[in-house]
Every structure is written in structure tokens, then in C-alpha cells.
Amino acid sequence: MLQGDSLWMTAYMLIKTTLAVGLWRMASTGYLQQKMALWERFLSVGAGALLIVALPLTDEVGFALGLLVVLQHLGRSKQIGTANA
């Protein structure tokens, strides 16, 4: 709960929640740069859930997993784009 915490903690929670909702949006639509693989969608849901759950280390694991999913997907879509060109 953020009762009496600093402005920085409020900004951190806002960024964390926005990222979680973005990951869930990617998973529910199944699209970022191109159609997402099923395993990417499952990892996006997991990363978003880890960002929301308030347990020790879940924020760090959620950020790392979310970054991994996004970077892997962008790399895969770039490889497919250069293969089609």
C-alpha cells in the first residue's frame, strides 16, 4: 500500500502497473510487431502477473521476463522482416 510513501514510489508503481497492463495487452491481442507465438503470449501473461503480485523478488523477475519477451519478439520480427525483403 502506498500510504505516505514518496512521489518516487508512486511513479515506480505507475510504471510497473503500466508495463504489466501492456504485457497483458500484447498477450490478449497476440500482436506486437507481428503475430506472437503462443509461448511468447504465455510468458507475457506470466511477466505481467509477476509485476502485479506483491511478493519478494517478483518485481525483478517480472521486469526481466517482460524485457526478455519484448526484445526476443522484436528480434524475431526483425529477422523475419529481413528474410522477406
Image (cartoon, rainbow, N blue to C red):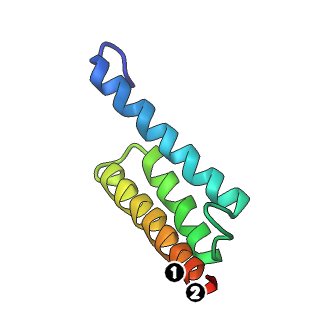
Nearer-the-camera pick, 73 or 82: 82
The C terminus, quarter of image: bottom right
Residue 65, picture quadrant: bottom left
Q: Position of residue 76 (x, y in %)?
A: 52, 77
Q: Would residue 65 appear left or right of 18 to someone viewing this image?
A: left
Q: Amino acid at mark 1?
A: Gln
Could you give the CA–CA distance between mark 2 and mark 1, rounded to whole angstroms?
6 Å
* Identity of the residue furthest to the front in this view: 85
Q: Residue at x 61, y 63 (%)?
A: 33
Q: Is 65 situated left or right of 73 in this image?
A: left
How crowded is the residue under tag 1: few (<14 C-alpha within 10 Å), some, or many (20+)?
A: few
Q: Residue at x 62, y 60 (%)?
A: 32
- The image position of residue 68, as x and y in percent, is 40, 66
58 above or below 18? Answer: below
Residue 79 marker: 1
Residue receiving disc 2:
83
Of residues 50 and 67, which is closer to you in this image? Answer: 67
Mark 1: which secondary structure?
Answer: helix
| Quadrant holding the N terminus | top left
* 4 shown above or below 23: above
Instruction: Verify CB contact (< 8 Å) between mark 2 and mark 1.
Output: yes
Q: Residue at x 44, y 53 (%)?
A: 50
Please rate how many residues cluster around mark 2, counting C-alpha atoms within 10 Å: few if below 14, some from 14 to 19, many from 20.
Answer: few
Q: In screen coordinates, is 49 left or right of 59?
A: right
For the residue pair 39 and 73, the one nearer the viewer reads as 73
* For residue 20, above or below residue 36: above
Q: Residue furthest right?
A: 29
The residue sitting at the bottom extreme is 83
